Amino acid sequence: MRKFLASFFLLFPLVSQAQEFQVVSSAASVRQVPMGQIEKTLNRGDRAPLTSIFTFWGKTENGWVNLDYTDFNFPFEKVMGELPLKFAIITTPENFNGLDLKENDVLYIAKVEDGKAVCVFKNRAFLLPEKDLNPESGTFSVVVINRKAVLSDGVNSVTVKPGTALLKGNNGYFYKNHYYTSLEPAQKNTDLDVDSILKKANRLIDIFNSAKLSSPLADRLGYYVKTLPVKDSDLEVVKTDDGGVGVVVNLRYKFFLKNGKPIKGRKTRLFLKESNYEFWRRLSEELFKSGVNKFVDLRIYRFNGEDSFEDCGFVDSSYHLYKLGYLKSWKSFLENSESNLSDDLWFFADEVYERLENG
């Protein structure tokens, strides 16, 4: 019986009716496969059809997109087919042939003959008297959930991932040989402590600024690139329909003399790519630890040599890739983030200073 159920699920790909997503970070790449080669890039505000979900990846007509960078409205569950079943729900804890069954556990009944029922429970088949089971029959819908959810029987609960297949009856759900009376989307805490985030970000900025001020490069040149403190107006919190929260942070850079005076009349350019990517990685990590569960979008601005700052691109990172350990070093952060930075952002001799940085 168990093999039959597994085979039945394989007949139905985990897809749902076409919906639409919108990019809410600076950009999102469309890839051949999840984590695969980039086919095209979608910018903030772009929309595209969404046909299915696999973990935190969404399928489009052109490939796969990391849903951490998007907002989407997808049906909570999708009916994939129907399956007739004969079953018995345990109403009181019992022990059958050394098998401990809890209240609301489900026995699938494959066959009844001569008053005996062939029962299946967690890959184990055994015979039981039919009169001891109070068997029932019904037709169940095979449904696939598209969001993280919580199943509950009133006492026990279990969290299930997107893409999980369930059997849905008139009064509840069967999942892993257990009967649950309710299925609800998992609730996410979307409240961020903005003041705390600003304090943590500025503390990290101070640490990296101090390191740049005291570096041999600053001693040699007599000036350094300072990251200006971030203010409330530099922070944008983006909340999505699935309960997620992303954050956009504007980072501004300006040349300062070692005596603390700003340099005017000259465009700011960044030195030492490794150091800058490590700062962006550390800042993104700090924001994920502070409650961000979708994306961190760092937008890079540099002083234009006159009286304002110009947009030089962005570096975006994904919460799920962070959780999976893909952002543990500046190199992996660079490889697994969405980014588009102006070539003019970097000092023209950055290769020379990279050699200095590497000893």
Image: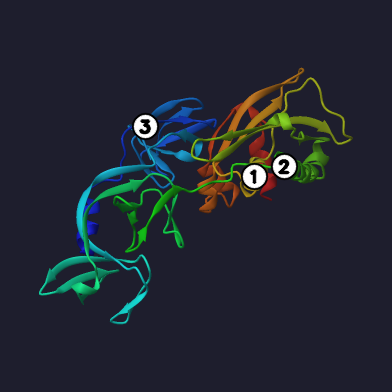
Tag 3, which secondary structure?
strand
Q: Which residue is mark 3?
A: 19
Q: Position of residue 50 (x, y in %)?
A: 37, 34
Q: Position of residue 105 (x, y in %)?
A: 34, 66
Q: Are marks 1 and 2 in contact (CB under 8 Å)?
A: yes
Q: Earlier in the sequence, mark 2 or mark 3?
A: 3
Q: Within the image, what quadrant is residue 77 found in?
A: top left
Q: Earlier in the sequence, mark 1 or mark 3?
A: 3
**Which residue type carries mark 1?**
Leu
Q: Is residue 55 visible?
A: yes
Q: Determine crowd level at label 3: few under 14, some 14-19, many 20+ residues with C-alpha closer than 10 A.
A: some
Residue positioned 23% across, 58% down in the render: 5
Residue positioned 56% across, 49% down in the render: 327
Q: Earlier in the sequence, mark 1 or mark 2?
A: 2
Tag in front: 2 or 3: 3
Q: Residue furthest right?
A: 259
The CA distance from mark 2 to mark 3 is 37 Å
Q: Which residue is mark 2?
A: 201
Tag 1, which secondary structure?
helix
Q: Are marks 2 and 3 in contact (CB under 8 Å)?
A: no
Numbered label attached to residue 287:
1
**Which residue type carries mark 2?**
Ala
